[in-house]
């Protein structure tokens, strides 16, 4: 392993740690805010930008992105993504510590499978850390367009199935993957710097969907799914579109198994949580429940 690759791996590890801690901070801040809506973007943006806790999380996420971009300038997309994808472990650990609750058996199995798959991806890349080619513009645009279409489908299915938080986590991850892929393209320089446009669009939509998802689901489900997809998709793009080297033999088979493990882990993280007691809304005018043995307060005359 050369010095450039070693520096890239260190930057990627620091990036994923900072980014996933930022996700948790943003989740807690967004969940405490009034209802956010894409139909009222200016109002929703104002709520986020005026919340100090959310802004701190967003600043941390921005710092993580800067480290990620630096790593991509030094190593292949697939290699960097295989390291940053391990952030699901950071997310799960910190989430459990901050909430004071243990992970459920399903969540724990999902995290273990995800981490095992991502570690297997890293091993499979041991003999193939080359940069590959620049990829054709047609193939790149087709990949980005197809990913955006998948995100819209995920949102539609999530809404229809009553699992909007899951749909937003998946769609957010897909849009983030467009941003990550575009970041690699932009670092190639020249005319490819124009992909800064899709970079901005991808990250803007991904961030927006995550904030909406945070108000509808847990951090591990929403951000966990987004983290897995954000990293798995660019690894596939690096292999398919940019022609980054693929190992043969045992290492090639290991990469297939790794993707399977990540997929199963994502499914487990997407499984529904047990619903908690419904929160009482501030505008709820219904009378409070009467506990047996107590007298319901009379309304003032």
Image (tube, rainbow, N blue to C red):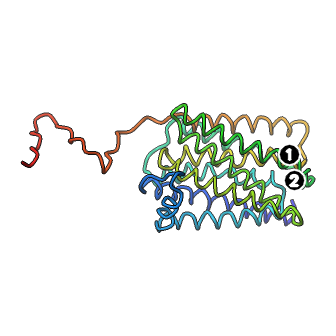
Read off the residue under disc 1.
239
In the rendered image, residue 55, in percent from the top left (x then y), is placed at 52, 66
Give SS at disc 1.
helix
The kind of secondary structure element at disc 2 is loop
Pick the residue in front: 35 or 92: 35
Q: Is residue 226 above or below residue 258?
A: below
> Which residue is label 2 attached to?
129
The quarter of the picture where residue 130 lies is: bottom right
Q: Which residue ends up furthest to the left in the rendered image?
A: 301
- Residue at figure coordinates x 90%, y 47% from the top left: 243
- The reply to whether discs 2 and 1 touch (Cβ–Cβ < 8 Å) is no
As measured in the structure, the alpha-carbon distance from the residue carrying label 2 to the one carrying label 1 is 11 Å
Q: Position of residue 151 (x, y in %)?
A: 67, 42
Residue 33 occupies quadrant: bottom left
Residue 248, compared with residue 10, is above or below; it is above
In the displayed structure, does residue 77 sit left or right of residue 215? right
């Amino acid at each position: 392993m050369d010095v450039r690759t070693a520096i890239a791996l260190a930057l990627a590890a620091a990036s994923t740690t900072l980014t996933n801690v930022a996700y948790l901070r943003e989740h807690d801040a967004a969940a405490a805010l009034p209802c956010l809506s894409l139909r009222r973007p200016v109002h929703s943006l104002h709520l986020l930008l005026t919340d100090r806790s959310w802004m701190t999380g967003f600043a941390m996420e921005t710092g993580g992105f800067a480290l990620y971009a630096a790593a991509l300038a030094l190593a292949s997309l697939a290699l960097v993504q295989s390291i940053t994808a391990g952030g699901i472990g950071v997310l799960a650990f910190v989430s459990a510590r901050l909430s004071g609750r243990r992970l459920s058996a399903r969540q724990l199995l999902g995290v273990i499978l995800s981490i095992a798959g991502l570690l297997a991806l890293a091993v499979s890349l041991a003999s193939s850390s080359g940069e590959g080619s620049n990829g054709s513009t047609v193939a790149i645009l087709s990949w980005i367009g197809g990913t955006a279409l998948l995100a819209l489908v995920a949102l539609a299915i999530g809404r229809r199935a009553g699992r909007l938080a899951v749909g937003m986590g998946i769609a957010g991850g897909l849009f983030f993957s467009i941003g990550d892929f575009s970041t690699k393209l932009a670092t190639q320089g020249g005319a490819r710097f124009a992909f800064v446009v899709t970079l901005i669009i991808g990250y803007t939509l991904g961030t927006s969907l995550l904030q909406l998802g945070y108000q509808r689901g847990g951090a591990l489900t929403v951000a966990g799914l987004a983290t897995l997809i954000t990293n798995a998709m660019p690894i596939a793009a690096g292999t398919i579109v940019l022609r980054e080297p693929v190992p043969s033999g045992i290492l090639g088979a290991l990469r297939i198994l790794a993707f399977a493990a990540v997929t199963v882990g994502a499914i487990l993280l997407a499984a529904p949580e047990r619903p908690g007691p419904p929160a009482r809304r501030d505008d709820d005018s219904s009378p409070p429940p009467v506990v047996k043995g107590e007298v319901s307060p009379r309304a003032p005359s």
